[in-house]
Amino acid sequence: MREVLVIGGGWAGIAAAMEAARNGWRVTMVEERPYLGGRARSFTDRMTGEEIDNGQHLMMGCYHEAMQVLRELGTDLNIERQSALRVRFVDVDGGSDILDAGLIPGAAGVAIGILRLRRLSIRSRLGILGLAVKLRTGRVSSAGLSCEAFLLRYGQTPQAITRFWEPIILATLNAPMHEAAADLLVAVMRLAFLGGVEDSKLYLPTSGLSTLLEPFPQWLANHQGTLHLSTSCDSLVVEDGRIVSAVLSNGTTLTPDVVISAIPQRALGRLLKDYRLDYRLDDRLDYRLDYRLDYPLDYPLRDSPIPPFSHSPILPFSHSPIISVYLWYNSPWMTDDFVASLGTTVQWVFNRRRLQRSASAETVGRYPGHVSLTISAGSDLAQLSAEAIIDQCDRELRALFPEMHGAILLHGQVIKEKAATPLLNVEALADRPGHRALHATANNLYLAGDWTNTGLPATIEGAARSGVAAVRDAGRH
């Protein structure tokens, strides 16, 4: 039986551990924090006693590996699935629009939904639809372009860019349009919005993110695995190009056959600081095979030259922040499950009273209205105090929702994830390592995480896919 050490208990590590256990390997996982989930976790707000996440998350039907994790854990029942993609956009002028893809299943329904957007000009709608067709058929070139440059190359109007494309880019890539890599926008559009019937549907967790992963320790134990929380991997011993042992902070020494590193770049660099790292970027074809994508990719395939070795450690990317704001009111003024907002700092508004089922009757009675707000790529906002952010968000909500008249703000909580995701601009995208990037240093070491070359933005799904891909590749060697 192969022994595998998984370092890191976020989504990448959990997906890797479950894939390895399904293969019949004996898994040991170490997580230095006392909880699982990494940057996607829950905690209790002290004043209200209510469970909130460190950031509101939307999932989609194309989250195949993430949903496989939840199905095996039995927590997929805590996901509310749309019958079809439906998003309401609200404006500061009081108007609104709805993208409703429910008329016809699949990509055709999304196309009809775009054509029915009333607050976009005919030219803008036709331009969006024309680019969508090109995206679906692979007739675009996005390599080396920012999202902004890509959209301008393909004739998108300023109105289409600000009212349609920018909300998608911010929500999925967490980067400003002039920085975000267009390759990732192409991947998102093909996989999610222009994919299969189920893929474009939005999935909304009805419990805290930590609750979704709560059964994992027992699942792992049932599969003869071992989990060490509040435990770090302090050192890896490399001999003759192979990791021969790992020393944990609790004094345990392991001798794994395979090591899956599912920790951030900085942590990996510290762990391997005593070794000269022979580092190379993986051939991106590996991900095409692992994920069985059935559409053309703009990424170089096996006939492209492979970047040469360099002798440098894994260096961290720059990061892009996400600001999450939780607000509690004395009245339940919001009727939608969620909306996208235009013309405001706030980008998404979620009705926690409709979506979350964990609040007690007493809490709901004391705080009838509860919403969460998301601001992606919020570098400027992150410099403000929590009080200033709450005040600004409350003012913007009152401009967006006239029905808030008379609603009293009772409490607010601001969560600044300053390193929420890697800032995947064109340069960073080219430097994303694959899961075999350090094989020249240690041929039984595989990398996983949303920062690796998943072909997707830094999302829960990207993290889960990287973990599965790393284990599958280890199984072939």
Image: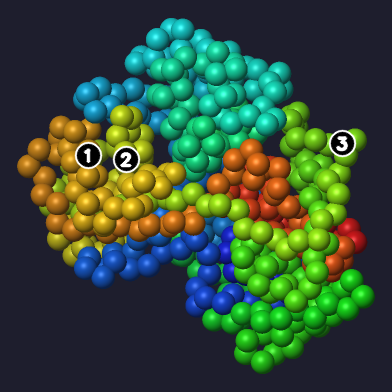
Question: Which of the labelled discs sits on residue 195, or is there none?
Answer: none
**What residue is rendered at 14% in x and 56% in y?**
410
Q: Residue at x 40, y 10 (%)?
A: 121
Which one is in front, 183 or 215? 183
Amino acid tagged 3? Ser
Camera-nearest residue between 477 and 179: 179
Residue 346 numbered mark, or none: 2
> In this figure, which residue is indicated by the disc labeled 3?
304
Q: Please name the residue shown 60% across and 17% down the image.
A: 153
Question: Residue placed farthest to the left in the image?
Answer: 406
Residue drawn at point x = 66 percent, y = 82 percent: 234
Separation of residues labelled 1 and 2 (CA atoms): 8 Å
Q: Position of residue 37 (x, y in %)?
A: 53, 64
User: What is the residue that sits farthest to the bottom in this orientation?
Assistant: 251
How has the structure been colored for display? rainbow
Identity of the amino acid at label 2? Val
Q: Mark 1 Cα within 10 Å, few/some/many (few <14, many 20+)?
A: some
Between discs 1 and 3, the one toward the N terminus = 3
Q: CA distance from mark 1 to mark 3?
A: 50 Å
